[in-house]
């Protein structure tokens, strides 16, 4: 069952709060991400599956935004 927007928001607030209070960064190393999701899920009382789904949403959103910026640079060169 997909996460509701409300649940994504709840998890987002908990994850971001945890990240900001502890180290202020987000890692993209796959093994570290998996370990981090498992640890944070335990700490926050959510399932690792919810944590993984949430991370996927966040990473895909960040990737999409990055690609928009990169494509705008490429398009400027073509003009």
Image (cartoon, rainbow, N blue to C red):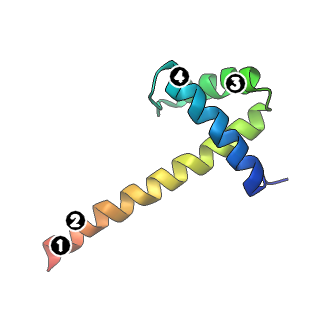
Asked if marks 2 and 1 touch (Cβ < 8 Å), the reply is yes
* Label 4: few (<14), some (14–19) or many (≥20) C-alpha neighbours in 10 Å: few
Above or below: residue 10 compared with residue 79: above
* Label 2: few (<14), some (14–19) or many (≥20) C-alpha neighbours in 10 Å: few
Asked if marks 3 and 4 touch (Cβ < 8 Å), the reply is no
N-terminal label among 1 and 3: 3
Disc 2, SS: helix
**Residue that label 2 marks:** 73
Q: CA distance from mark 2 to mark 4?
A: 35 Å
* In the image: residue 74, left or right of residue 49: left
Q: Indicate the quadrant where residue 48 lies.
A: top right
**Residue that label 4 marks:** 21
Q: CA distance from mark 3 to mark 2?
A: 37 Å
Image coords of residue 10 (percent x, y): 72, 43
* Label 3: few (<14), some (14–19) or many (≥20) C-alpha neighbours in 10 Å: some
Q: How many marks?
A: 4
* In the image: residue 73, left or right of residue 51: left
**Residue that label 1 marks:** 76
N-terminal label among 2 and 4: 4
Q: Which residue is at the front of the view, 65 or 12? A: 12
Q: CA distance from mark 1 to mark 4?
A: 39 Å
Image coords of residue 26 (percent x, y): 47, 32
Q: CA distance from mark 1 to mark 3?
A: 42 Å
* In the image: residue 73, left or right of residue 4: left
N-terminal label among 1 and 4: 4
**Residue that label 3 marks:** 38
């Amino acid at each position: 069952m997909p996460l509701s927007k409300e649940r994504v928001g709840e998890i987002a607030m908990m994850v971001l709060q945890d990240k900001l209070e502890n180290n202020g960064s987000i890692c993209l190393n796959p093994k570290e991400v998996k370990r981090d999701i498992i640890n944070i899920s335990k700490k926050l009382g959510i399932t690792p599956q919810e944590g993984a789904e949430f991370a996927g949403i966040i990473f895909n959103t960040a990737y999409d935004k990055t690609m928009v910026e990169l494509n705008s640079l490429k398009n400027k060169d073509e003009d």
